[in-house]
Image (cartoon, rainbow, N blue to C red):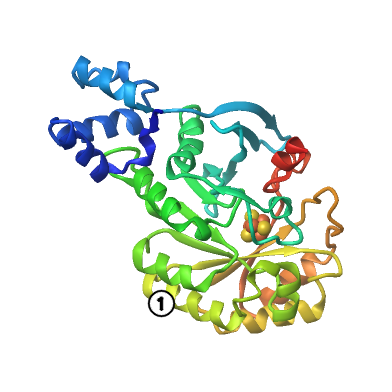
Amino acid sequence: MKKDIKDLNLDELKQYFLSINEPEYRANELFHAVYKEKKENFHDITTLPKSLRKTLSNTFYIYSFKIISKYESKDGSIKYLFQLSDKSLVETVFMHESNQYGKMRNTLCISSSIGCPLGCKFCATGQMGLLRNMTSGEIIEQFMQIDKITKINNVVFMGMGEPLLNYDNVKKAIEIISDGNGRALGKRKIVVSTSGIPGKIYQLTDQISSVRLAISLHAGEQSKRDFLMPGLKDHTLTELRKAINYYTRKTGNTITIEYLLLKEVNDTISDVKSLVDFLKKLKFVKVNLIRYNPVPHVKFKVSKKEIMFLRFLQENGIRATLRKSKGPDISAACGQLATKLRK
Ligand code: SF4
């Protein structure tokens, strides 16, 4: 059976070429052709000898996904539904939006697993359970498929799955797409959005410190967070805060706290006070308040307390912005479309 060439980083490719009696530098040529020139099959990589191209195409493939649906939102975001080689479905969302300086940028929201074991109550992916983790090649393919169409400036791991529960494959995918011999997307242009697994935050800080981190907090009070995010009950907010402080101290990066506002669940004055208490013990922090994008068969409703929440945070000296959900008309919240189509 053929293997995914994107599962090999540059060092592994060099080892492979040495094992077939080819010089190491062939790995750099191949990396450049696949990631920079975006060649779709080995026969087109004319920097490699013909016999080697044949060996490669008998052993590996470059792309395997099928785009089975593409949904365009009125707000410009586009959701792609990919079918993987084992027929699993995965979602990737393209967003064209302005950054804090008003400059337009192309951001791709990518997935790291099919389903998710953490079962957050407001999340469509969480309702699926974990079907399987994605390989590094599959994580990269989402990026490459869209980057071929439109150049991507930023990547956020905010699609289906908890990226830190598939740590090794996510780390490898980040290393490959940021490798200077290939696509060279800066690590600072990559955001890993996690529900907050303290041990893995320490590991990420020590191993891939340049990437930016976002934490899906959704409650500053332990019992409320345990209710909304039951898969994280084993990790306390105190442990999480220590891990966040380790990341910000060691990297000097600002951390983004994501807070999804749910009507009468986590949007009261006492909720915002708990959030402020949690945040006051952190340095270099900003908050994104997110408007809820309703999920079918999930009972939560959109909060109308956004402005009260925003003002309270700002009055307490906390940088905060209000972010609308992208593509509510195309089921853009993570996992909604894949769940719908699987059913
Ligand atoms: S919100 Fe993220 S961590 Fe929670 S169930 Fe959904 S995908 Fe998993």
Question: Can see residue 302?
Answer: yes
Picture quarter containing residue 78? top right
**Where is 225 relative to 127, above or below?**
below
Picture quarter containing residue 339? top right
Q: Secondary structure at mark 1?
A: helix
Residue 227 placement (x, y as % from top left): 76, 72
The quarter of the picture where the N terminus appears is: top left
Residue at the front extreme?
1
Residue 301 placement (x, y as % from top left): 86, 58
Which residue is found at the position 76% from the left and 64% from the top? 261
Amino acid tagged 1: Arg
Image side of residue 59 versus residue 98, left or right: left
Residue behind mark 1: 249
**Where is 243 relative to 150, above or below?**
below
Residue 190 placement (x, y as % from top left): 45, 52
Question: Can see residue 221?
Answer: no
Ligand 1 quarter of the rendering: bottom right
